[in-house]
Amino acid sequence: MHDSLFPSPSAIPRRGQIAPRLLAISGLLWAAAGCVGEVGDTGSSGNGGGQTSGTGGTGSKGTGSGGRGTASASGGKTGAGSGGTTGSGAMIGSGSGSTPGTGSTGQTGSGGASTSGSGGSSTSGSGGSAIPAPPPALPKESACSGGSPGPRLLRRLSAAEMAATIPTLFGDTTVPMTGVFQDPTVLGFHIDANSLLVQDLNADQLMSNAEAIAHWAVTTPAVLSRVSPCMTMDDSCQTQFITNFGKRAFRAPVSADRVTAYKKIFAAETSFSDGAEAVITAMLQSPFFLYKTELGTSKSGMFPLTPYEVATSLSYLLTGNMPDATLLSAADSWSTPPTQAQVDGQIDRLLSPGPALQTALMGFFTGWMGLDRLATNAKDNTIFMLTDALRADMMSETTNLVVDTFTNGGTLGDLFSADHSFLNKELATFYGINTNGLGTSFSRVSYPMGGPRDRGILAHGSILNGYARPDISSPTQRGHLVRSRLLCQDVPPPPANLDTKLHAPTSATPTTRAQYEQHVTQSPCDQVHTLMDPIGFGFENYDGFGRYRTTQNGTAIDASNVIYQAGSTGQDLKGANLTDLGMTLASSNDVKMCGARYWAYYAYGSVSWDQDGCTYDAIRTEAAAGNYSLKSVLKAIIHASHFTTRVQDK
């Protein structure tokens, strides 16, 4: 990373100053993270008359979007208006496609006594375009023709990563932070680099948040002593504080010129606490804190990522948090890029059993399988009161199975065919399973074939409640889960204003299955429903709350199911019940490859790029060698060259 990528921290306002709009708090305008071109030159000065500000011209070079992202940045400094008010540097042009955008050089603007002076207008880079719309499904892979590892990126910390990082940075969970970002959901996740923006309101919120945290830190003795080993105003102490705290906040050493710039901020204050408060405020608004850089250093036409960039990506992927002291210390001695042996030493340490492993695994599985729907899906309390405690138990069951499968070398397929689960007494009672030996904690419970519960994760209450209507089951939702999320097959969205209301059960349609079968015959989407409903019928032994049943309204349940044109085989795969469906999915190569593709998206934050097939080919090859165990898939994603090396987007 080169410090010239971001402007001087002296541009960052301190407490009491007014924050310019967007993220000009850093002297930088960030619209989105994407593939990076060159940072623009300083805009020319505006020449506004009277009380009106001039507008600085555009920097001479734009930031390219690299085909997928559209990063934008302002000129390095703002132009100065002559009318007593500071003019603002204009935004650098952005380019899309594969060429960095080029903004035109700004010219000095001139204005009359009552009108604004305007700087030279900027032109967008070649192929300039708006931020791309989020994809509705995973796009097809781009064929591998030259072994390209993918473009350079900037990725803003997600809201969850921010919430984990700040308490860890200060070593105190009572830090008074507020949520700044409302991250959009893209393909079930909150990690898409193109969608994690810093917008108008965020800038003001970031400043307020930074000021509140910094003031709390310096007025809480235990915290201040934790973040600074000294508390004097001499040059040595200032340097020590800035380099130590800065390395942890930026997740990389602070360059010498930036240390100097932060010392100017520090020295402008009259006491150590005020100086530290000003520096902390500035650092918490810095792009070096807010963004995970994946830029690397130029070498023979490639851009190997720095040890600290790799360490940062590794830590957030495996722990959901900033690198710990051990990882940062290891990065100090890593090569550029780090070797596989260097990275593997930290992978094994970070994946040891514990809360961090649970965070790493469930961050992915929650997004992939839509487990968060358990908490948000509306339920009809007049039919059954699904308490928050019972919802929490259902999520704990799924979490325990995922973590246990990973820890014991299990595969993606094992999750769908598991002959056991993890229950406590309350959840076992709800499931109708013998509670002997069970208490409030969760214990492993075997599921015999033909027992009172189907095998595999699909029979978990977390899935069955998340994919259901408020009052009854939903074969369509449950089948859509299998088709789109587990098999990676796109399902066309329903037309606007489609009537999805089911008629009340009748003697001809006493079961949910019968209702859906009748409804589909009257629907203009019968062909689309054929992709989902016959799969979802395999879940029909479970009502909308996940309770097992063999009859409905006095009629026997028919849980036979079929996956028409299943995956790459194109075969129709049939089953008698949910256990059979789980066994079919467990043995499916399409499910294994689909899970790996979604996990790669979760790890990389990018849904596609030119020649991304090179990366996916490498992941599949290594994962297959490890029988697609959960651990082998995760390691394959990290071992792919995309994790440690990039190319300049063309």
Image (cartoon, rainbow, N blue to C red):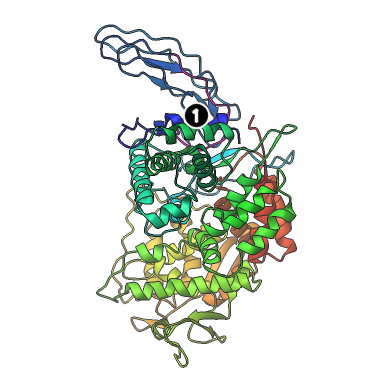
199 vs 352, left or right, is left
Task: Examine the rendered structure and indicate whether residue 256 appears above or below residue 253.
Answer: above
How many circles with numbers are drawn on the protein?
Answer: 1
Q: Quadrant of the N terminus?
A: top right
Front residue of 427/254: it is 254
Where residue 637 sits: x, y (%)?
65, 54
Residue annotated with mark 1? 7
45 vs 569, left or right, is left
Front residue of 612/295: it is 295
Where residue 230 sits: x, y (%)?
48, 48
Outermost residue on the bottom side: it is 436
| Residue 296 located within the stretch drawn in magenta | no
Q: Quadrant of the C terminus?
A: top right
Where residue 346 sits: x, y (%)?
66, 58
Q: Main secondary structure of the magenta part?
A: loop
Where residue 92 sits: x, y (%)?
48, 23
Range of magenta residues: 29-44
11 vs 380, left or right, is right
Does the image show residue 17?
yes
Q: Secondary structure at mark 1?
A: loop
Residue at (65% x, 40% y) in the render: 150
Front residue of 547/345: it is 345
Residue at (31% x, 61% y) in the render: 501
**Label 1 neighbourhood size at 10 Å, few (<14), some (14-19), many (20+)?**
many
Residue at (69% x, 50% y) in the render: 640
Does the image show residue 511?
no
| Residue 30 located within the stretch drawn in magenta | yes
For badge 1, the amino acid type reads Pro
